[in-house]
Image: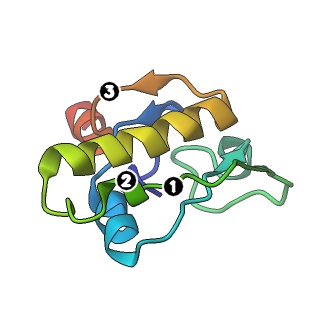
Amino acid sequence: YPEGTRSPDGRLFRGRTGIARMVLEAKVPVFPVAMIDTEKVQPIGRRFPRIRRIGVVVGEPLDFSRFTGMEGDRLVLRAVTDEILYELMKLSGQEYNDVYASTLRDKRR
């Protein structure tokens, strides 16, 4: 979950770079996985989930070996994170919002 939290409104939000740190340190490909219709299983604000099926779409593996040795570069971390989020956006069909989900959630409180 590269966004770091649940989406407050169903859109895809800016990812945290922790995912990139793990990927570059582990030197492994990433298989992007999008879960579809999760808001029907547990709508925002509901305490208990409803029993339903969700969709799962698995994308092609993403190779980040071109960034080997650049694990400490914050621009590389952002680029890797953004590439992963872009693939998730394509797989899920979600609209992308380039702000952190936690920032939006905090403004609504």
Q: Position of residue 59 (x, y in %)?
A: 70, 48
The disc at residue 98 is: 3
SS at mark 2? helix
**Mark 1 vs mark 3: which is more N-terminal?**
1
Task: Please tell me which residue lies in front, 47 or 51.
Answer: 51
The disc at residue 25 is: none
| Residue assigned mark 2 | 66
The vertical placement of 69 against 73, above or below, is below
Mark 2–mark 3 distance (CA, rounded to whole Å): 25 Å
Mark 2–mark 1 distance (CA, rounded to whole Å): 8 Å
Outermost residue toward the bottom in this view: 26
Looking at the rendered image, the disc whose residue lies closer to the viewer, 2 or 3, is: 2
Disc 1 residue type (three-letter):
Asp
**Other-residue count near label 1 (Cα within 10 Å), few / some / many at <14 / 14–19 / ≥20:** some
Verify CB contact (< 8 Å) between mark 2 and mark 1: yes
| Residue assigned mark 1 | 63
Query: In terms of image quadrants, where is residue 109?
Result: top left
Classify residue 84 as left or right of residue 62.
left
Task: Please tell me which residue lies in front, 96 or 32.
Answer: 32
The vertical placement of 101 against 70, above or below, is above
